[in-house]
Image (cartoon, helix red, strand yellow):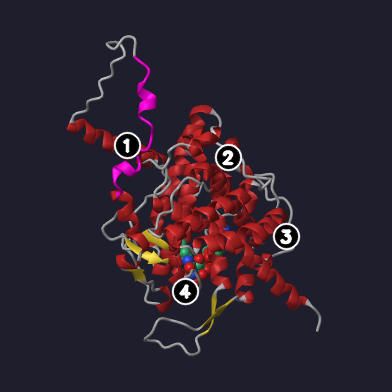
Amino acid sequence: CFDALHGALGDCSCNVDTIDYFNNVKIFPRIQSLVSKDYFRFYKVNLKKECPFWADDSRCAMKYCHIKTCSKDSVPGYVDEHENERPAEKYTKIDQTACSTDEDHNPDLGYLNMTISAASQYEIAKWNAHDSALENFCECDDRDADAEYVDLSLNPERYTGYKGPSAHRIWRSIYQENCFRPKLNPYESFPYVLSSDLSNMCLEKRVFYRAISGLHSSINIHLCSNYLLSEKGVDFAAPPEGEWGPNLEEFQRRFDPSQTHNEGPNWLKNLYFVYLLEMRALSKAGPYLETEEYFTGNPTEDEETRAAISNMLSVIYSFPDHFNESAMFNGGSQAAKLKNEFREHFWNISRIMDCVGCDKCKLWGKLQTQGLGTALKILFSSQWDSLEADPEQGTLPVRHKANKRLQRTEIVALFNAFARLSNSIRQLENFRIMLSANKEPE
Ligand code: FAD
């Protein structure tokens, strides 16, 4: 599968080899170290939501699907409560006097009635929630009563044994019902979508499919690179240990052209594609992300996190061939309609994640779709355009609560999702080395 994994990526001016070098040398070490920091390690998520599309068929009984949640006391700084209840004065450092020195020449005409009845305030809060939901590509469920913290470092994404009809129903439903499908695979079987059909689709629909397919590749690369090689020494009453590592055969089964109707290399290219997409979102939101506090309650740790963020973003800014999202959704009312469909389809995919029948797969599936959804929001909702148009904006008081553009959980998901893609590209290098070692004559 590596012979075909070179050269142009398509739908952008970038190529696979440039990304390989840039990721493996520059991004990978930085992002892995960043997501091990406390701010990024704890993810709040509701894994108990009912599947909205069909009766949940399989609470996973496999021990490798099990996840460990955290009590609030083990989360540094009680992160989200702190965020919500931070005293207002901490945020109101804007110089009010500088705004009120200009006298209005005609106080009557200039008068604005700013009083709002309690009832309208309630309505406006509802409008705001509705409007911001319109800009969102997925549901945030960290405020749900059932949401719990998970320490990601204790629950690594790896082989779980989740497969068969339940896993296939999720993927089939994602590709067949929610992607802009070029046309049905006539055999109604695998692969769900043929890459040869993509050239007949418009850029926006192709981007959508490629992003989902890239995410699918990343998930499957993780299970191949962190495979259960042997169960020796596993105590069945205790959390699973065993021996974990790369499984080249499993990787080839999933991506070799001869075993995938020639699709494997395209699926791998889609991984690079979704990586580019998320990296562009980080670059675009960079001026804002650099002003976040990354609060955990430990000033030294927080300072280090901010420094690591700035350092990583400066490397990302230096990437020469960023994805160009401005080529998408141009063309009046049709484009606006398409954008809305794009958002609704992605929203559905994020809800399908509640139907995943393995808790660990669900955790990482939800995190990665939320990360990708956050990236799409940054790329395609108008509120983010102004940030980049005026880089000075990044230095304005965006820490002020009213200006807050991303929730903590979205930031955590965005960076962790990108870290997963980065790790997948790095793992491909390992498989490439293993494969060439296998080929060498005795
Ligand atoms: P599947 O991966 O189930 O794919 C089904 C079909 O889709 C394939 O036959 C092929 O035709 C097509 N396809 C495959 N890859 C692509 C691609 N990249 N792009 C387009 N089409 C493709 N298992 C784990 O062990 N650990 C996990 O953490 C894990 N997380 C998961 C998270 C989610 C959200 C889901 C839905 C599943 C997860 N799984 C996980 C299961 C795993 O993804 C596979 O479904 C499972 O291993 C069965 O693999 P399969 O070979 O039957 O093909």
**Residue 210 seen in render:** no
**Mark 4 sits near ligand 1, with its Cβ under 8 Å away:** yes
Most extreme residue toward the left, as rendered? 118
Kindly identify which numbered label has been placed on residue 160: 4
For mark 3, does the 10 Å Cα neighbourhood hold few (<14), some (14 to 19), or many (20 or more) residues?
few
Query: Is 118 in front, or is 180?
Result: 118
Task: Give yes or no for contact between labels 1 and 2 (Cβ–Cβ under 8 Å).
Answer: no
Label 4 crowd bin: few (<14), some (14–19), many (20+), radius 10 Å: many
Which dot marks residue 325? 2
Compared across the picture, whether 178 is left or right of 29 comes to: left
Which residue is the extreme one toward the bottom?
233
Is the N terminus in the top left, top right, bottom left or bottom right quadrant? bottom right
Residue 343 lies, in percent from the top left, at 45, 43
Mark nearest the camera among 4 and 3 is: 4
Which region shows up in magenta?
86-103
Residue 128's disc is 1
- Counting from the top left corner in percent of width and height, residue 169 is at 44, 62
Q: Is residue 94 magenta?
A: yes
Q: Are marks 4 and 2 in contact (CB under 8 Å)?
A: no
Residue 378, given in percent of the width and then of the height, sits at: 49, 43
Task: Classify mark 4: helix, strand or loop.
Answer: loop
Residue at 50 percent across and 71 percent down: it is 158
In-front residue for pair 308/272: 308
